[in-house]
Structures are given as C-alpha cells and as structure tokens.
Image: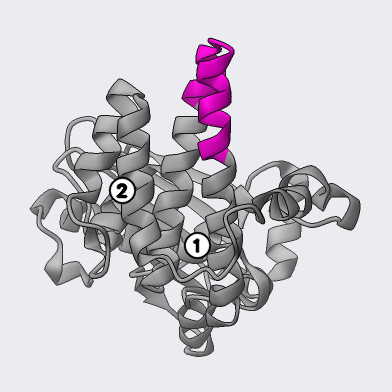
C-alpha cells in the first residue's frame, strides 16, 4: 500500500497535512502510516493511524511526561476524522523483530513511510512485520490443544447450564480455530478487530468458514460447534492425540506465569 493507492481523497489530504506537520520536526526519525489505511480495510469514516519513530532519548523524555501518544482532529480534512499515533523507537522495532507477539508484528504489516530520514529503519520495519516461521510447528500443536480444551468447556457449560462458560467457550473455540487457520497460512494474528478479515483472506481454510463461525456465535448449539471443529480438524497439521490437550492446557494456561511467559492468547 502507498499513499496513491488509498481509496479516499480525504485520507490523502489528511496525510498531506500530517507530512507538513512533521516534515521539519527534528525529533521524527521516520513516520509510517498504519492501521486500516495500510491494511486495506479503511472505510470512508476511518481514522488515520500513524507510527512515529523517535530516538530512545526522546522517547524516555516523552515517557516521563506521559506523552507517548499523538492525537489531532485539526489535521483531518473530513467530518469526524482524526489522526491517532504512537511514538516508538528503533530499539522497540528491533525487539518486535526478534521476539514480538503477532499483534505487535501485525501493526507493521503493510505500513508505508510518509517520512523517512534513516533508511536503516526500513529494514527494521520489514523484519518486525515478518511471520515467525520458527514457531509455526509448535503453535499448530498448542492452538489445536486450546481448540479441544474449549470444545470440552463448551459441553461443561451446557451440562451445568452455565451461559457464561458457554459464551466464553464459544469465543475461544472461534479464536483458536482462526489462529490455526492463520498459522497454517503463515498469516499474522492481528488481534480481535481484524481477525475474521485476515482469516477470510487465507487461501487455505475450511469451506464456508466464516458462515460456520457466525452461525456458532449466534446460536451456540452443539451441532454448530462440531461443524466448525470438524472443518478445522480436516486441515489441521497437529500430531497430538485426542486426549493430549490437558498437558498443553497445563503449560499454556495454568502455569506460564511460573516461567514469566505470556499467556497463549497473547502470542
């Protein structure tokens, strides 16, 4: 995506104002356009998301002042629009590239520069947005175990007539079904807002996957749950047996805090 490829003129004119606002600011090492405009999901009323890269020294000054975010409605050229941004550093970019979780990586997927004063930052941004191939096989096993765990919790919720547990189980079955599909296709998990859109773009997925998901979320019936799970199982590459999921659940949900590791949903 580039500025010329944006669908709406008012987003282009707003970004022209953003460039004018920051082009002579010595604090800014680079400024990238992100969010829905970069990912190709923008609507006419979408806000403009920017990423402002500054030095570590300037970042610490801003951190002490509680000033790590940027917001402006004045730069917008359309009714209800605004510009929303975050200040980050090259050190942060490098950390994301080496060990960032997938939502953090997705923030840099498709983003494009509006201002760039250090060409080395371009390679850092590219690396930060890469899918972590070295984790793919292990994540396939771990996500499959979560699918089976929450499948079990769904039936526990029905058995005990617990609507909260049923709703939580449905949400997690959908989450891990989608994470299996994204992982299989080497697509980053974008967090909840754009998850279904990214899943829809996956070339390899169960037939009518989005319909299966929407039906399950709306009706929460056992037959809807099983239809989704069967579709995922047909394409899943995990090698574990049907009764192995409790061991994964123990490691990924009950005890990661003991190892100072993130909860599996945050990977």
Is 110 on the left or on the right of 129, as rendered?
Answer: left
In the rendering, at what x and y percent does residue 35 appear? 35, 54
In the rendering, at what x and y percent does residue 107 appear? 45, 60
Q: Is residue 33 magenta?
A: no
**Closer to the camera, 79 or 178?**
178
Q: Residue at x 36, y 40 (%)?
A: 226
Q: Residue at x 48, y 49 (%)?
A: 176
The dot on residue 196 is 2
| Looking at the image, residue 75 lies above or below residue 152 | below
Is 28 on the left or on the right of 112, as rendered?
Answer: right
**Closer to the camera, 156 or 56?**
156
Is 133 on the left or on the right of 254, as rendered?
Answer: left
Please say whether residue 22 is visible from this viewpoint.
Answer: no
Of pointers 1 and 2, the one earlier in the residue sequence? 1
Numbered disc in front, either 1 or 2: 2
Q: Is residue 153 magenta?
A: yes
- Quarter residue 43 falls in: top left
Is 115 on the left or on the right of 250, as rendered?
Answer: left
| Looking at the image, residue 223 lies above or below residue 140 | above
| Looking at the image, residue 219 lies above or below residue 6 | above
- Quarter residue 22 falls in: bottom left
Q: Residues within 10 Å of mark 1 (few under 14, many from 20)?
A: many
Q: Which residues are magenta?
A: 150-167
Q: Which secondary structure class fits the magenta region best?
A: helix
* Residue bearing the label numbered 1: 52
Q: Quadrant of the N terminus?
A: bottom left
Q: Residue at x 33, y 70 (%)?
A: 110
- Quick one: SS at disc 1? strand
Q: Residues within 10 Å of mark 2 (few under 14, many from 20)?
A: many
In the rendering, at what x and y percent does residue 34 appear? 37, 60
């Amino acid at each position: 995506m580039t500025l010329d490829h944006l669908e709406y003129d008012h987003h282009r004119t707003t970004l022209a104002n953003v460039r004018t606002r920051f082009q002579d600011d010595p604090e800014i090492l680079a400024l990238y356009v992100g969010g829905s405009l970069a990912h190709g999901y923008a609507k006419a009323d979408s806000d403009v998301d920017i990423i402002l890269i500054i030095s570590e020294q300037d970042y610490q000054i801003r951190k002490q002042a509680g000033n790590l975010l940027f917001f402006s409605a004045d730069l917008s050229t359309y009714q209800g629009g605004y510009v929303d941004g975050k200040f980050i550093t090259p050190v942060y970019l490098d950390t994301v590239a080496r060990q960032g979780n997938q939502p953090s990586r997705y923030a840099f997927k498709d983003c494009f520069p509006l201002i760039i004063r250090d060409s080395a930052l371009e390679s850092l941004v590219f690396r930060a947005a890469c899918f972590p191939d070295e984790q793919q096989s292990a994540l396939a096993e771990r996500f499959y175990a979560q699918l089976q765990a929450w499948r079990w919790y769904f039936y526990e919720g029905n058995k005990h007539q617990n609507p909260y547990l049923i709703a939580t189980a449905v949400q997690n079955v959908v989450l891990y079904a989608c994470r299996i599909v994204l992982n299989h296709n080497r697509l980053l998990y974008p967090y909840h807002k754009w998850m279904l859109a990214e899943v829809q773009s996956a070339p390899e997925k169960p037939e009518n996957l989005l319909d299966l998901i929407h039906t399950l979320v709306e009706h929460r019936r056992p037959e809807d749950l099983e239809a989704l799970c069967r579709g995922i199982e047909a394409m899943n590459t995990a090698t574990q047996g049907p009764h192995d999921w409790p061991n994964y659940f123990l490691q990924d949900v009950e005890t990661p805090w003991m190892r100072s590791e993130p909860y599996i949903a945050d990977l």
